[in-house]
Amino acid sequence: MPPPDPDAFRVAMSGLPTGVTIVTANGPDGPAGATANAVSSLSIEPMMMLACLDRGSRTLLAVQAADGFGISVLHAGQEPIARAFATKAPVAEKWTGVAWSERDGLPAIDDALIWIACDLRDVISAGDHVIVTGEVRALESRQGDPLVFHAGEYRPLA
Ligand SMILES: Cc1cc2nc3c(=O)[nH]c(=O)nc-3n(C[C@H](O)[C@H](O)[C@H](O)COP(=O)(O)O)c2cc1C
């Protein structure tokens, strides 16, 4: 059998529904953030998270410079924020019109369902991405309808 091609891989994996987060950090040029769904809890003892960031992600540079990162899990009404942070617009422009605040020394999206602040632990090379792991040092969460990404579209869970 021929090896699967990247397009088939992309299409196949688009069938895995995920939540939608904004990974953030204070970089040398100010707050940076990227829409990311390759984000997961990793360990309970100690509490750890991971995020997979593209080698070309400006947010990755900010995470490494800041030695930490934040994760804001979006609710169903925050699709415009997911769209804004999935672009290569100038880093500062992404925050225009977005309600955010400095929390635990990191930029956080206001009103997100979950907020997690992490100290950077590992930076692991993985193909065209880099896996960053972080130890959780602050956590806030509330119940609500999460934003879901599936088959290339944003959807509410309900
Ligand atoms: C739903 C969705 C999920 C995404 N997940 C990731 C991800 O997990 N990791 C990543 O590096 N990029 C992901 N991206 C792409 C980034 O958001 C995009 O490359 C962005 O421009 C990066 O911005 P930056 O260069 O300012 O960091 C995702 C995009 C979308 C629309």
Image (spheres, rainbow, N blue to C red):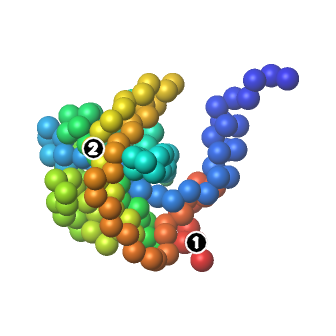
Would you place residue 67 above or below residue 114 in this image?
above
Q: Is residue 81 visible?
A: no
Q: Amino acid at mark 1?
A: Leu
Q: Quadrant of ligand 1?
A: top left
Q: Residue at x 47, y 58 (%)?
A: 20
Secondary structure at badge 1 equals: loop
How far across and how far down the image is residue 26, in percent? Answer: 19, 46
Pointer 2: residues within 10 angstroms few (<14), some, or many (20+)? Answer: some
Quadrant placement of the C terminus = bottom right
For this rendering, which residue is in front, 46 or 105? 46
| Mark earlier in primary sequence (2, 1) | 2
How far across and how far down the image is residue 85, in percent? Answer: 35, 53
- Alpha carbon separation for disc pair 2 and 1: 30 Å
For this rendering, which residue is in front, 129 or 115? 115
Q: Does the residue at mark 2 contact the one at mark 1 (Cβ under 8 Å)?
A: no
Q: Residue at x 46, y 77 (%)?
A: 144
Which residue lies most toward the top here? Answer: 2
Would you place residue 8 above or below residue 128 in this image?
below
Q: Which residue is mark 1?
A: 157
Would you place residue 148 above or below residue 3 in this image?
below
Q: Amino acid at mark 2?
A: Asp
How far across and how far down the image is residue 5, in percent? Answer: 69, 29
Q: Residue at x 45, y 51 (%)?
A: 44
Q: Is mark 2 within 8 Å of ligand 1?
A: no
Q: Which mark is residue 119?
A: 2
